[in-house]
């Protein structure tokens, strides 16, 4: 650890719900970082969060990125601002953790893939936090170890209790289904090649013209099928389940019953977590702790720019599928060699070593590893010496 820089000085761009959550995490729960700059298009909100985390406000996002006191950038601004802001981070040579989407169209997302490929090391990490959730890590480990035999099918359920009015069918693909896009690529370690969207009867609380729920079907390179029920106005709670069916068994995560209580009225049951920040709170913090540790070494440790681009491409095909009712192919541009993959630069990194039981056992000093080179399945290089924060306790 002696070669690590002092605390990573972070600028947080965009302090809506996620940005403020990350800024608070950096200031309180995450080791090795301090928030030095806050930027938001709403000056009051920026000032409020900055005061809380002990940072200064910089009104212009590009000035915030270029600020000499900023080592790394966390982007939680609206998606339309991401392309320019991520490119500015690449230009400045600063590691960036960008909330999804990478950008709002395929061409600008691919331009970032190409821009990063010319650099000495990867700098762009995407905020696909489910890859840091202990249950997803366990499922991935089970598949990778051959515990299910050849994985044949993935069934996903993604229900939100409620969403704002602007969540129409297309937005549901871009903002919600995007998680199952990444999870499918992560678990199956291959690309998605087509998307189909089935629009059935809508809940009466859906606005006119919005199909909620929908069933999305992905095909992958090898012909595997993934189904995703997306239902964002269930009125119940946050329900995200994933089941993988293999040749020698199946496994499911996301039962999320929490405390199971038996009561005098003869009922037994648990309590579903109300929302995604609560359900994935620990995953967000693990993601952030890992990113901070890697960024202190000038790089990233998690899903990268290629994962961001692939997700944009699949979601754009999904939007076409919503519009046309057709099965829409996903055609990815050629994948350039990842930044720094020549081996000329960078530290040799340890072999992946984390297992799900390690995570669940909550050993806070265990060395973690997942993707960092943008491989869908997370076979990339872990950053060395990164330790997990308290993995189970401390949900926000
Ligand atoms: C939201 O943006 C998220 O990222 C949540 O994880 C997802 O459940 C929700 O549907 C999205 O709108």
Image: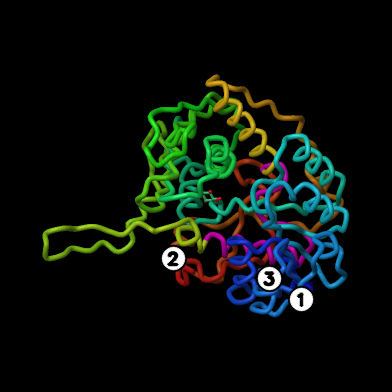
- Specify whether 80 is left or right of 237: right
Residue 178 point in image, percent of width and height: 57, 41
Q: Quadrant of residue 40?
A: bottom right
Q: Residue at x 82, y 40 (%)?
A: 114
Q: Secondary structure at mark 2?
A: helix
Q: How far apart are the alpha carbons under marks 1 and 3? A: 13 Å
Q: Position of residue 304 (x, y in %)?
A: 70, 48
Q: Nearer the viewer, mark 1 or mark 3?
A: 3
Residue for point 57% across, 44% down: 175
Q: Which residue is mark 2?
A: 361
Q: Report crowding for label 2: few under 14, some 14 to 19, many 20 or more residues within 10 A (C-alpha).
A: few
N-terminal label among 3 and 2: 3
Q: Relative to residue 163, is residue 292 depicted above or below?
A: below
Q: Crowding at label 3, few (<14), some or many (≥20) Cα neighbours within 10 Å?
A: few
Asked if marks 1 and 2 touch (Cβ < 8 Å), the reply is no
Front-most of residues 2 and 214? 214
> Is 230 left or right of 306, judged from the image as shown?
left
Mark 3 highlights which residue? 44
The residues tagged by marks 1 and 2 sit, at their Cα atoms, a distance apart of 39 Å
Q: Nearer the viewer, residue 30 or 54?
A: 54
Q: Is residue 8 above or below residue 284?
A: below
């Amino acid at each position: 650890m002696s070669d690590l820089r002092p605390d990573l000085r972070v600028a947080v761009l965009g302090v809506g719900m996620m940005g403020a959550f990350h800024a608070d995490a950096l200031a309180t729960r995450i080791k090795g970082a301090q928030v030095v700059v806050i930027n938001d298009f709403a000056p009051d909100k920026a000032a409020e969060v900055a005061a809380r985390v002990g940072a200064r406000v910089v009104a212009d996002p590009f000035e915030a990125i270029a600020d000499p006191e900023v080592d790394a950038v966390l982007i939680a601004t609206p998606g339309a601002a991401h392309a320019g802001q991520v490119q500015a981070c690449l230009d400045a040579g600063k590691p960036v953790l960008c909330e999804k989407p990478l950008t709002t169209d395929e061409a600008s997302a691919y331009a970032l893939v190409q821009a990063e490929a010319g650099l000495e090391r990867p700098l762009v990490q995407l905020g696909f936090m489910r890859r840091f959730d202990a249950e997803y890590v366990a499922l991935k480990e089970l598949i990778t170890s051959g515990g299910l035999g050849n994985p044949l099918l993935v069934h996903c359920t993604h229900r939100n209790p409620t969403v704002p009015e602007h969540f129409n069918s297309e937005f549901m693909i871009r903002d919600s289904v995007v998680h199952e896009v990444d999870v499918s690529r992560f678990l199956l370690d291959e690309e998605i090649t087509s998307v189909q969207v089935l629009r059935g009867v809508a809940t009466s609380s859906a606005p006119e013209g919005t199909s909620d729920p929908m069933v999305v079907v992905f095909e992958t390179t090898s012909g595997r099928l993934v189904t995703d029920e997306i239902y964002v106005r269930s009125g119940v709670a946050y329900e995200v389940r994933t089941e993988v069916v293999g040749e020698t068994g199946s496994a499911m995560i996301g039962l999320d019953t929490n405390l199971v209580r038996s009561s005098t009225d003869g009922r037994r049951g648990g309590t579903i977590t109300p929302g995604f920040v609560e359900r994935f709170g620990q995953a967000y913090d693990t993601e952030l702790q890992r990113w901070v540790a890697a960024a202190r070494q000038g790089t990233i440790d998690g899903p990268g720019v290629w994962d961001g681009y692939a997700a944009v491409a699949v979601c754009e095909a999904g939007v076409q599928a919503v519009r046309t009712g057709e099965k829409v192919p996903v055609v990815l541009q050629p994948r350039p060699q990842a930044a720094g993959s020549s081996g000329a630069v960078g530290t040799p990194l340890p072999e992946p070593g984390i297992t799900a039981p390690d995570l669940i056992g909550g050993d806070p000093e265990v060395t973690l590893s997942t993707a960092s080179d943008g491989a869908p399945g997370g076979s990339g290089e872990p950053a060395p010496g990164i330790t997990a924060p308290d993995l189970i306790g401390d949900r926000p």
